[in-house]
């Protein structure tokens, strides 16, 4: 074994209570990863983890109780990745699940993700590096055990955090104790998949008990000693720029500590939350508003044909075939503005001192948030520590969290810790919305009743473009907004001629990442249209698709999920006892997913009774969590497809509260969800977003079979 | 003003200048129990659901002065890891939570429903449980509600989780 001496300087031996060794092996294992573009990350799922590789970073701690603390650079927002990461680490460390505890890496630990937690990449991008880190660490500790036990390294076996050799045993904690200089081996070979005890098993979530017994896990639950409460006056109209504020009434309100006037906002610090809110409401701010926007303005902006087109996919010569033909079928589809509506509001607890700042908050972008706050405070990035917490829902809403800046500025102004978060109206009005979309599809059938040519034009507000995660200079290189066209490409490579064209439209309000990005709307449009073509061809929609899938690995996996869902659901075109089935499929980040829904219509209202879902995410690290993600994504997709819609009225985004912003509730959730998991790849792919793809089109396709009405607009409502 | 009530079985007294302050903020910020969540502040989402005299109420819109002399139960008082409430046991067995933020509110709403109606029909469940879960864990929630009914009525042995 080749050994590299690691100087003590390279190890951040922290004096934390009960901590024996802090292992910073990341630097060595993750040297020189190939950095691919962000587009690759979202499209193929093959992007490497984009973590820090230039300086020592903390991944693992060994405690005196012989447990391992894993510092995760990915945040836990419900997707279950803490559990999957624990399984992966435990299996290569040879410790039990009870012996591993996953925590969020704070930015001071150096274990910073240069990208974000998002795009269904937490497990897939850490699949190789985390197991290699764990295996390397196991060998490093084993090496120390060999020295202390005075036995040959090769004679040692490890299990449940204990080394054994020749009748002697030693815990990892004992082996690590007192070590100041480590031998770092070359990365050991990983175990065979069949030898894993935890990977591939439906293990209960590691955060399950905390979440059932009400532990304070979230940013909203954070406190600091001597903490005050802040509130910031936020705009209620689109495009409003802060000008000035009359604070004379607010200044004398009960509990007020200070009114803070900045160049770009005004806020208040008070003794309690309600006092801060009351004082904020008494501030009379003036805003500059250029225009009073309406929904019709936005709909007009978002039409295909306006803005900048970019061809993102092309095969054959669809343009000339479709232009010259009288048999060309054309249809257009629409999706509305969608709100994130995550339950935990955005907020932060900040403590800013002269030369350092600590900010506890729910965020999907720890590094970007740290850099933004350091910039605003005039501190170095090493003086700002972002302490991420569990997220009360992410869904993309926390891929830009400048709200941390406001808490920090308020804290600095009063010299004490300040907690500041948005109320629900502010959340709705200041969301970074899922952009509305408009789609025009054209298709032509050949003599055999298969698709000769197909074109999808999608016009959307920005998703990835304009985000701090995508530098402005990258936009011309990428050409089209990869978030907007996500899920919009034609997945049936057997069609001889096709094109997908993305039209970019910058809207006057913030639009951004919303779980699955363009997948929800794009799949609704494309898979509804494919259904229209199947009906025009008088073909079964499942067989119609199967006949036009290309012969390669991606095609094979898509075919398999389609066949599996058709078989498990017993798909039929016939309406039986007033119930109709609808079918749709999608491929997202290399994960194919197909769904069949069963719907009825009563009193002109659509009701989804059953969803059968077949998905192939490749290797399922935790099959139960993959199922949970499918179930949740399906119901969230039903919510977005059947109920949710933001409007623009007299310059304001509305509604601003749950209820009027209609969402699926328990009564709307299907009583049967049957998930079939296929695993036709030996690596884990995307899980959290792909199952949002097919649901909208599947419902619309079922409604057509039941009523003859083709619904081409979300949310789906019968006339 | 002084307000006296019982919180999770223990006598509690708070001094507050404004009796219309929502109970939620007294529980969270003065008494330090963070299991009851803020979601909307308008009684529209149910994240702040707790029990006042065994009835589920949305504490973000419930003035603290109304709890004088009453019994308040929050998720922290519903059950413990050693002795979980049947609803919590069912939630563990069905692995319901994802992000988990709304779950205490759902469990409190479910516990109150089963207290009043130990064997609710699907329609009664639909009518009573109107909280919002953005992760949309509703499928497992419904299974967990039925499992809690079983645990309550049949004295079934809890499964190991």
Image: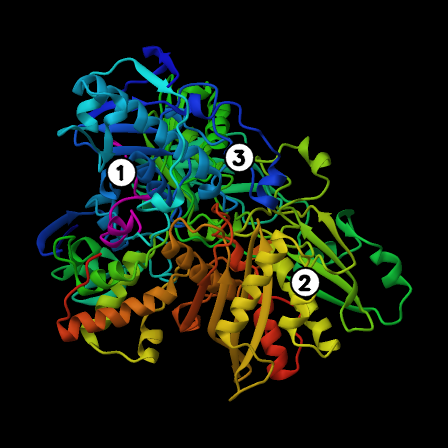
Disc 3 + disc 1, Cβ < 8 Å: no
Q: Name the residue under label 2.
A: A526
Place residue A221 in its image quadrant.
top left
Q: Mark 1 points at which residue?
A: A100
Q: Which residue lies furthest to the right in this view?
A: A324
Of callouts 3 and 1, the N-terminal one: 3
Place residue A475 in its image quadrant.
top right
Magenta residues, as a range?
A205-226
Give the residue drawn at x 59%, y 38%.
Answer: A467
Q: Mark 3 points at which residue?
A: A48
Mark 2, other Cα within 10 Å: few <14 / some 14–19 / many ≥20: many
Q: Is mark 3 on a helix, strand or loop?
A: loop
Q: Residue furthest bottom?
A: A577
Give the residue drawn at x 20%, y 47%.
Answer: B16
Q: Can residue B59 be seen in this view?
A: no
Inter-mark Cα distance, 3 to 2: 30 Å
The label on residue A356 is none
Relative placement, left or right, of A93 versus A399 is left
Of callouts 1 and 2, the N-terminal one: 1
Relative placement, left or right, of A409 versus B28 is right
């Amino acid at each position: 074994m080749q050994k590299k001496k690691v100087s003590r300087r390279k190890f951040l031996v922290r004096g934390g209570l009960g901590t024996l060794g802090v292992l910073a092996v990341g630097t060595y294992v993750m040297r020189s990863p190939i950095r691919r573009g962000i587009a690759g990350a979202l499209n193929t799922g093959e992007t490497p983890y984009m973590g820090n590789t230039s300086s020592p970073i903390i991944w693992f701690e060994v405690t005196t109780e012989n447990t391992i603390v894993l510092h995760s650079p990915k945040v836990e927002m419900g997707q279950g990745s803490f559990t999957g990461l624990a399984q992966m680490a435990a299996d290569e460390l040879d410790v039990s699940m009870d012996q591993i505890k996953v925590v969020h890496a704070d930015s001071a630990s150096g274990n910073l993700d240069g990208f974000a937690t998002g795009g269904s990449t937490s497990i897939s991008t850490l699949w190789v590096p985390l197991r290699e880190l764990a295996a390397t660490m196991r060998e490093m500790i084993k090496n120390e055990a060999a020295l202390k036990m005075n036995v040959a390294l090769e004679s040692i076996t490890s299990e449940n955090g204990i080394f054994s050799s020749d009748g002697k045993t030693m815990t990892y904690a004992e082996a690590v104790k007192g070590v100041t200089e480590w031998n770092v081996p070359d990365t050991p070979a990983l175990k065979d998949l069949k030898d894993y005890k935890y990977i591939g098993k439906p293990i209960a979530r590691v955060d399950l008990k905390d979440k059932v017994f009400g532990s304070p896990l979230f940013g909203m639950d954070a406190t600091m000693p001597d903490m005050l409460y802040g509130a910031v006056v936020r705009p209620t109209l689109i495009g409003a720029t802060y000008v000035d504020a009359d604070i004379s009434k607010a200044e004398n309100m009960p509990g007020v500590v200070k009114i803070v006037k900045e160049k770009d906002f005004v806020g208040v610090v008070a003794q309690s939350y309600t006092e801060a809110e009351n004082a904020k409401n008494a501030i009379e701010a003036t805003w500059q508003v250029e225009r009073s926007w309406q929904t019709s303005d936005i709909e007009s902006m978002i039409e295909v044909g306006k803005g900048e087109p970019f061809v993102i996919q092309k095969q054959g010569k669809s343009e000339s075939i479709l232009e010259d033909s009288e048999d060309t079928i054309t249809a257009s589809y629409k999706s509305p503005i969608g709100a994130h509506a995550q339950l935990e509001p955005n907020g932060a607890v900040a403590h800013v001192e002269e030369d350092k700042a600590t900010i506890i908050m729910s965020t999907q972008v720890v590094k970007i948030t740290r850099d933004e706050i350091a910039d605003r405070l005039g501190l170095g990035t090493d003086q700002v520590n972002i302490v991420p917490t569990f997220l009360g829902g992410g869904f993309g809403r926390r891929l830009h969290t400048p709200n941390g800046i406001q808490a920090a500025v308020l804290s600095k102004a009063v010299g004490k810790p300040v907690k500041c978060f948005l109320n629900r109206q502010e959340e709705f009005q200041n969301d970074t919305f899922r952009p509305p979309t408009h789609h025009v599809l054209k298709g032509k059938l050949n003599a055999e009743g298969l698709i000769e040519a197909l074109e999808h034009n999608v016009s959307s507000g920005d998703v990835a473009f304009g985000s701090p995660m995508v530098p402005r200079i990258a936009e011309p290189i990428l050409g089209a907004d990869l978030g907007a066209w996500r899920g919009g490409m034609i997945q049936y490579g057997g069609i001889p001629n096709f094109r997908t064209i993305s039209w970019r439209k910058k809207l006057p309000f913030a639009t951004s990442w919303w779980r699955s990005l363009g997948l929800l709307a794009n799949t609704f449009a494309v898979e509804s249209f494919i259904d229209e073509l199947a009906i025009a061809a008088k073909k079964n929609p499942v067989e119609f698709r199967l006949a036009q899938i290309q012969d390669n690995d991606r095609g094979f996996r898509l075919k398999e999920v389609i066949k599996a869902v058709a078989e498990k659901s017993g798909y039929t075109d016939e309406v039986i006892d007033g119930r109709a089935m609808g079918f749709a499929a999608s491929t997202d980040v290399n994960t194919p997913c197909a769904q069949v829904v069963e719907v009825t219509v009563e009193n002109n209202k659509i009701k989804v009774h059953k969803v059968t879902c077949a998905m192939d995410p490749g290797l399922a690290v935790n099959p139960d969590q993959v199922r949970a993600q499918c179930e949740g994504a399906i119901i969230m997709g039903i919510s977005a497809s059947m109920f949710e819609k933001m409007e623009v009225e007299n310059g304001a985004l509305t509604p601003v509260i749950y209820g009027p912003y209609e969402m699926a509730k328990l009564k709307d959730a299907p009583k049967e969800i049957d998930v079939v998991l296929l695993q036709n790849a030996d690596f884990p792919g995307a899980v959290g977003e792909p199952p949002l793809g097919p649901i909208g089109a599947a419902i619309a396709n079922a409604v057509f079979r039941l009523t003859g009405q083709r619904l081409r607009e979300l949310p789906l409502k019968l006339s | 003003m002084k307000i006296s009530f019982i919180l999770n079985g223990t006598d509690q007294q708070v001094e507050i200048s404004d009796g219309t302050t929502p109970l939620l903020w007294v529980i969270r910020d003065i008494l330090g129990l963070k299991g009851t969540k803020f979601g909307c502040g308008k009684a529209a989402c149910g994240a702040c659901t707790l029990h006042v005299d065994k009835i589920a109420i949305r504490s973000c819109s419930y003035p603290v002065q109304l709890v004088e002399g009453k019994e308040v139960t929050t998720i922290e008082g519903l059950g413990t890891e050693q002795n979980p409430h049947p609803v919590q046991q069912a939630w563990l067995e069905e692995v319901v939570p994802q992000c988990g933020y709304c779950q205490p509110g759902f469990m409190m709403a479910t516990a109150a429903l089963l207290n009043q109606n130990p064997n609710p029909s699907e329609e009664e469940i639909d009518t009573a449980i109107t909280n919002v879960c953005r992760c949309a864990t509703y499928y497992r929630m419904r299974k967990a509600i039925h499992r809690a009914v079983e645990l309550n009525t049949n004295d079934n042995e809890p499964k190991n989780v």
